[in-house]
């Protein structure tokens, strides 16, 4: 049974979320002490987190970073803040998705199902330790680790999916629609800016390994992973 951890201080909304999630057979735990979100997460070990932005003490961005130090499980923000900057900040701080309030519970359930399938189910990247190597850069698809010159960096599920698709089609252009289709099966609910944010995050991970110009934007077409990148010293 999949476990969902809800970090939200609106008790009425929490009750409604619990009701809908229980109907779909999910085990649900809600935060009890907003001073100890991290320890409650560690104790529960959820498969997915629903996280509000406006919380007592520390905001959701803070707790997202704390959780990312422990886990790569999907984190879906649920917030009344609807600005593009708030959504970008959520993704930049380690979130996987962003749903604005008020929302349709069917969409929330659809997104949760989608992220769980991507992370653990039929679309998960755990295929017997599958790895892809391009120009000395190795992607461990199952462990979501990128390695170059004996340096490792961890990826989120979505970052690993993007690199998986681009690296296995190295030197070929992959359209934005193809990436959206491959990564989010409910792409009708995905803001186009979401992919831009993730592409930026992937580039930052490559930069951390001193790899520049590997992920190229092909204007009007999509993206291409170039094996002849520059190696920063």
Image (tube, rainbow, N blue to C red):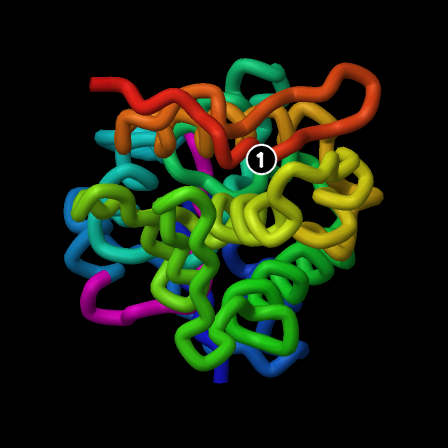
Q: Is residue 62 above or below residue 24?
A: above
Query: In x, y percent, where is residue 99?
Result: 63, 39
Q: Is residue 196 left or right of residue 120?
A: right
Query: In x, y percent, where is residue 18?
Result: 54, 66
Q: Is residue 45 magenta?
A: yes
Query: In x, y percent, where is residue 139?
Result: 41, 54
Please tell me which residue lies in front, 125 or 106. Answer: 125
Q: Is residue 90 above or below residue 153?
A: above
Q: For residue 112, what is the image quadrant?
A: bottom right
Q: Is residue 199 magenta?
A: no
Please tell me which residue lies in front, 48 or 174. Answer: 174
Residue for point 63% across, 70% down: 123
Q: Is residue 176 left or right of residue 225?
A: right
- Callout 1: few (<14), some (14-19), or many (20+) C-alpha neighbours within 10 Å? many
Give SS at disc 1: strand
Please tell me which residue lies in front, 152 or 102. Answer: 152
- Is residue 90 among the parts visible in the rendering? no
Query: In x, y percent, where is residue 129?
Result: 40, 75
- Which segment did they paint magenta? 42-53
Residue for point 64% across, 37% down: 171
Q: Is residue 106 above or below residue 170?
A: below
From the image, which quarter does the C terminus lie in? top left
User: According to the image, label 1 marks what residue?
Assistant: 225
């Amino acid at each position: 049974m999949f476990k969902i951890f809800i970090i939200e201080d609106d008790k009425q909304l929490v009750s409604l979320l619990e009701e809908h999630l229980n109907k779909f057979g999910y085990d649900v735990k809600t935060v009890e002490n907003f001073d100890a979100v991290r320890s409650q997460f560690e104790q529960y070990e959820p498969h997915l987190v629903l996280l509000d932005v406006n919380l007592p003490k520390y905001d959701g961005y803070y707790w997202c970073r704390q959780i990312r130090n422990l886990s790569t499980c999907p984190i879906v923000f649920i917030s009344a803040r609807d600005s593009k900057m708030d959504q970008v900040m959520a993704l930049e701080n380690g979130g996987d998705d962003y749903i604005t309030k008020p929302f349709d519970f069917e969409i929330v359930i659809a997104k949760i199902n989608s992220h769980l399938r991507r992370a653990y189910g039929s679309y998960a990247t755990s295929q017997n330790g599958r790895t892809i190597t391009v120009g000395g850069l190795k992607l461990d698809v199952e462990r979501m680790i990128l390695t170059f010159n004996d340096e490792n960096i961890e990826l989120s599920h979505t970052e690993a999916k993007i690199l998986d698709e681009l690296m296995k089609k190295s030197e070929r252009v992959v359209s934005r629609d193809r990436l959206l289709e491959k990564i989010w099966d409910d792409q009708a609910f995905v803001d186009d800016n979401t992919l831009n944010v993730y592409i930026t995050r992937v580039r930052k991970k490559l930069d951390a390994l001193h790899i520049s110009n590997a992920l190229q934007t092909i204007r009007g077409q999509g993206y291409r992973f170039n094996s002849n990148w520059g190696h920063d010293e």
